[in-house]
Image (spheres, rainbow, N blue to C red):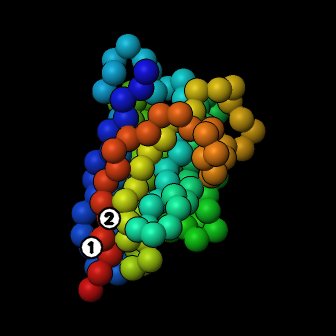
């Protein structure tokens, strides 16, 4: 099964930028056959889907809270999925997870889990504070 690993988190001031990366360390499987979602967990709240990208046609979907600020992309050569985060706000603080779904390519990838994404990374912390 996939073994997802996120990286790129850190501490930034409001208005700053970070780029998160998601890779699969189990070389028996290719990340290129999976739809990838990025989820944000704030302590005391549930995980919120912020962005996702399908495989094959790379269709994207974003939560309203991040539209225009975050960009999800994937590099097939590096088998890596990125979340470029610009204009960061204090409310973006939390742990960010990438998750993978291996079903048929959806027309629009989902920002809700409900068991749709069976594979998850360990998360990377993002802190936005002045």
When the figure is inspected, residue 74 is found, relative to residue 38, above or below; the finding is above
Name the image quarter holding residue 98: top left
Nearer the observer, 43 or 58: 43
Q: Quadrant of the N terminus?
A: top left
Indicate the position of residue 53 as horizontal and vertical percent values. Answer: 57, 43
How far, Cα to Cα, is label 1 from label 2?
Answer: 8 Å
Indicate the position of residue 29 as horizontal and vertical percent values. Answer: 42, 18
Whether residue 16 sits left or right of residue 115 in the image: it is left
Q: Which mark is residue 12?
A: 1
Q: Which of the two discs, 1 and 2, sits closer to the camera? A: 2
Q: Which mark is residue 126?
A: 2
Q: Residues within 10 Å of mark 2 (few under 14, many from 20)?
A: many
Mark 1 touches mark 2? (CB < 8 Å) = yes
Name the image quarter holding residue 89: bottom left
Q: Which mark is residue 106?
A: none
View extreme (right): residue: 107
Whether residue 35 sits left or right of residue 120 in the image: it is right
Residue that appears at 71% across and 35% down = 106
Q: Earlier in the sequence, mark 1 or mark 2?
A: 1
Residue that appears at 52% across and 39% down = 36
Residue that appears at 24% across and 69% down = 11
Name the image quarter holding residue 114: top right
Residue that appears at 61% across and 58% down = 62
Indicate the position of residue 118 as horizontal and vertical percent values. Answer: 53, 34
Nearer the observer, 69 or 111: 111
């Amino acid at each position: 099964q996939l073994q997802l690993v996120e990286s790129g988190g850190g501490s930034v001031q409001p208005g700053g930028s970070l780029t998160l990366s998601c890779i699969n360390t189990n070389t028996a499987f290719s990340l290129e056959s999976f739809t990838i979602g990025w989820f944000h967990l704030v302590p005391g709240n549930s995980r919120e889907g912020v962005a996702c990208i399908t495989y094959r046609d790379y269709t994207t979907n974003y939560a309203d809270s991040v539209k225009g600020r975050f960009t999800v992309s994937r590099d097939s050569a590096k088998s890596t999925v990125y979340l470029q985060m610009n204009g960061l706000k204090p409310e973006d603080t939390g742990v960010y997870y990438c998750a993978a779904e291996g079903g048929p390519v959806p027309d629009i990838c989902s920002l809700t889990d409900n068991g749709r994404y069976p594979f998850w990374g360990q998360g990377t912390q993002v802190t936005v504070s002045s």
